[in-house]
């Protein structure tokens, strides 16, 4: 196994680095998806999806279509051409 360092260039990038508790999954053709998370500035859950294409060695994640539900602290996995987001939280369990 060989490890590679991959940094982000946040200039002119749709991902601003303000998410935590997101999930990352590897999909075929050397692509990585970042799904969901919670915003560090307002603690609201996110349904955003970003793709990093390791074949072209891009340092700017690309914005993809949002997930159906906002999620953080979940796991995502690729299976038979689909990406599944499993578990996690969406803040609907917090009393108002």
Image: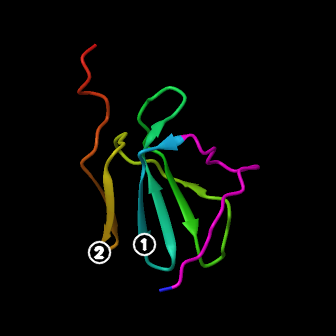
Q: Which residue: 37% across, 39% down? A: 70
> Of 22 and 14, which appears nearest the observer?
22
Q: Which residue: 63% across, 67% down? A: 6
Indicate the secondary structure of the residue bearing disc 1: strand
- Which of the two discs, 2 and 1, labels the residue nearer the N terminus? 1
Query: What span is colored magenta in the figure?
Result: 2-18
Magenta span dominant secondary structure: loop
Position of 6 relative to 55 (above/below): above
Q: Which residue: 31% across, 55% down? A: 75
Mark 1 packing: few (<14 Cα in 10 Å), some, or many (20+)?
A: some
> Of 6 and 84, which appears nearest the observer?
6
Where is mark 2, residue-wise?
A: 80
Name the image quarter holding residue 62: bottom right
Give percent across and percent down for residue 52: 57, 65
Image-based side of 51 in relation to 92, left or right: right
Residue extending furthest toward the right: 11
Disc 2 from disc 1: Cα separation: 10 Å
Q: Which residue: 67% across, 68% down? A: 58
Name the image quarter holding residue 83: bottom left
7 in magenta: yes
Name the image quarter holding residue 41: top right
- Give me the disc on residue 10: none
Position of 16 relative to 31 (above/below): above
Indicate the secondary structure of the residue bearing disc 2: loop
Image-based side of 93 in relation to 55, left or right: left
Q: Are marks 2 and 1 in contact (CB under 8 Å)?
A: no
Mark 2 packing: few (<14 Cα in 10 Å), some, or many (20+)?
A: few
Q: Nearer the viewer, mark 2 or mark 1?
A: 1
Give percent across and percent down for residue 79: 29, 71
Where is mark 1, residue-wise?
A: 27
Quadrant the C terminus occupies: top left
């Amino acid at each position: 196994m060989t490890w590679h360092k991959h940094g982000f260039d946040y200039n002119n990038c749709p991902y601003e680095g303000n998410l935590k508790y997101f999930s990352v999954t590897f999909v075929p053709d050397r692509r990585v998806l970042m799904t969901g998370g919670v915003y560090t500035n307002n603690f609201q859950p996110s349904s955003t999806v970003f793709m990093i294409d390791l074949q072209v060695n891009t340092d700017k994640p690309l914005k993809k279509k949002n997930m159906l539900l906002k999620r953080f602290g979940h796991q995502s996995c690729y299976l038979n051409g689909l990406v599944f987001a499993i578990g996690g939280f969406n803040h609907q369990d917090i009393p108002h």
